[in-house]
């Protein structure tokens, strides 16, 4: 069985459905800070089976361990944590406390139950530098001042230390791009809150006439003066995790970091144009001064050749497909 922390969130719930469709059994834990209890009911209805679940903050190691001990867990996918770059600048202590404590608690739990196969969901933002060809060998910029980025850097350092001092661990760290999309049939996707933390959520609201426009930083040193990001469809992420789990089963004491994203970066202006084509709605771009006096990472692009070589994985879906699938789900299928 596979334990998924943050299992009712956007990424975690998609992974759960994907693995269930492959005949895997999953166990979910989530504290519902960024998710909804109804998500479990819908997951069970769609999958047609009972899914073990506990509402718990994974930082509560005794409660987490007591629950997980009931099941034969052979791998853990760690999705729990706070993930907003902008929000972390406003709540630095909350981000450090949540992200670092959650990881350490999950690792302690795994040590106690004897499970050593671990997939950690990280981010391309971890590099802390503006480049289009970021590879796994690119040194992390530890001087980039952002609590979310620095917490991710610290988490990978913790995992590397755990691996170095315990020869039983197999760890796959997936540095994922901006995740978007939904299941292609429209039956499962991201539930966008009233105040979205992602640009995709904001785009959906503007296209659906719930918001006047979207604020864009338009002073970047790029071709169209908007920042460029690597996006990846949630189903491509699910495929990557599935392949990582299979790969880990064949390893003996292995630690690997993999970029998981589309090879091509997309500018925010290009993203808006694609969203207008997909939704047939006008999406006004409003000038934003956010980031003018801070360290804006203007280009985040990934070299994904290692994932192709090691896992035979590459992103199959376009940015336009992500928008189509997300829009279909957002509009109710």
Image (cartoon, rainbow, N blue to C red):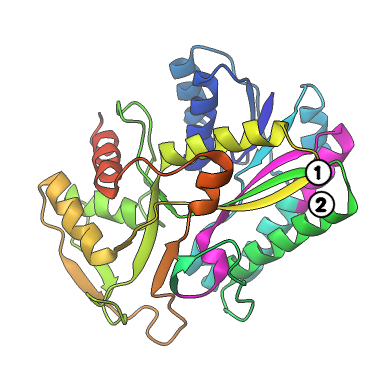
Asked if the magenta segment contains residue 257, the reply would be: no
Does dot 1 land on a helix, a strand or a loop? loop
Query: Can you see residue 33?
Result: no
Quadrant that contains the N terminus:
top right
Q: Quadrant of residue 94?
A: bottom right
Is 270 rendered above or below residue 5? below
Residue lying at the far bottom in this picture: please name it. Answer: 293
Image label count: 2
In x, y percent, where is residue 49?
54, 12
**On the picture, is 72 further left or further right than 301?**
right
The disc, 1 or 2, on the residue closer to the chain's N-terminal end is 2
In the foreground, 263 or 24: 263
Q: Which residue is mark 1?
A: 253
Q: Residues within 10 Å of mark 1 (few under 14, many from 20)?
A: some
In the foreground, 266 or 275: 266
What whole-number distance in Å separates the C-alpha atoms at marks 1 and 2? 8 Å
Residue that appears at 35% across and 42% down: 181
Q: Which residue is mark 2?
A: 163
Query: Can you see residue 74?
Result: yes
In x, y percent, where is residue 85?
49, 66
Q: Which residues are magenta?
A: 104-130
Does dot 2 land on a helix, a strand or a loop? helix
Asked if the magenta segment contains residue 119, the reply would be: yes
Q: Quadrant of residue 138?
A: bottom right
In x, y percent, where is residue 302?
46, 60
């Amino acid at each position: 069985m596979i334990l998924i922390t943050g299992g009712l969130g956007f990424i975690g719930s998609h992974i759960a459905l994907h693995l269930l469709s492959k005949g895997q059994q999953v166990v979910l834990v989530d504290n519902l800070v960024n998710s909804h209890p109804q998500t479990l009911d819908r997951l069970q209805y769609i999958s047609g089976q009972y899914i073990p679940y506990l509402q718990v903050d994974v930082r509560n190691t005794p409660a987490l361990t007591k629950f997980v001990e009931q099941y034969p867990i052979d791998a853990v996918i760690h999705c729990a944590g706070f993930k907003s770059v902008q929000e972390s600048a406003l709540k630095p202590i909350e981000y450090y406390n949540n992200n670092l404590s959650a990881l350490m608690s999950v690792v302690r739990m795994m040590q106690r139950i004897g499970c050593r196969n671990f997939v950690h969901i990280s981010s391309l933002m971890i590099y802390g530098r503006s480049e289009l060809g970021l590879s796994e060998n690119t040194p992390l910029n530890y001087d980039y001042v952002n609590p979310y980025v620095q917490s991710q850097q610290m988490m990978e350092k913790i995992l590397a230390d755990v691996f170095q001092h315990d020869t039983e661990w197999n760890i796959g760290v997936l540095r994922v791009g901006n995740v978007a999309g939904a299941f292609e049939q429209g039956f499962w996707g991201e539930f966008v809150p009233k105040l979205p933390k992602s640009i995709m959520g904001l785009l959906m609201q503007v296209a659906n006439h719930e918001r006047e426009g979207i604020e864009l930083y338009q002073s970047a040193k790029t071709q169209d003066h908007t920042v460029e990001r690597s996006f990846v469809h949630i189903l491509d992420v699910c495929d990557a995790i599935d392949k990582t789990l299979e790969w880990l089963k064949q390893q003996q004491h292995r630690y690997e970091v993999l970029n998981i994203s589309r090879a091509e970066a997309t500018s925010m202006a290009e993203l808006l144009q694609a969203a207008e084509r997909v939704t047939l709605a006008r999406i006004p771009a409003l000038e934003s001064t956010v980031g003018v006096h801070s360290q804006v990472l203007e280009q985040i692009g990934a070299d994904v050749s290692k994932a192709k070589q090691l896992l035979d994985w590459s992103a199959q879906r376009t940015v336009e497909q992500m928008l189509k699938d997300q829009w279909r789900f957002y509009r109710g299928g």
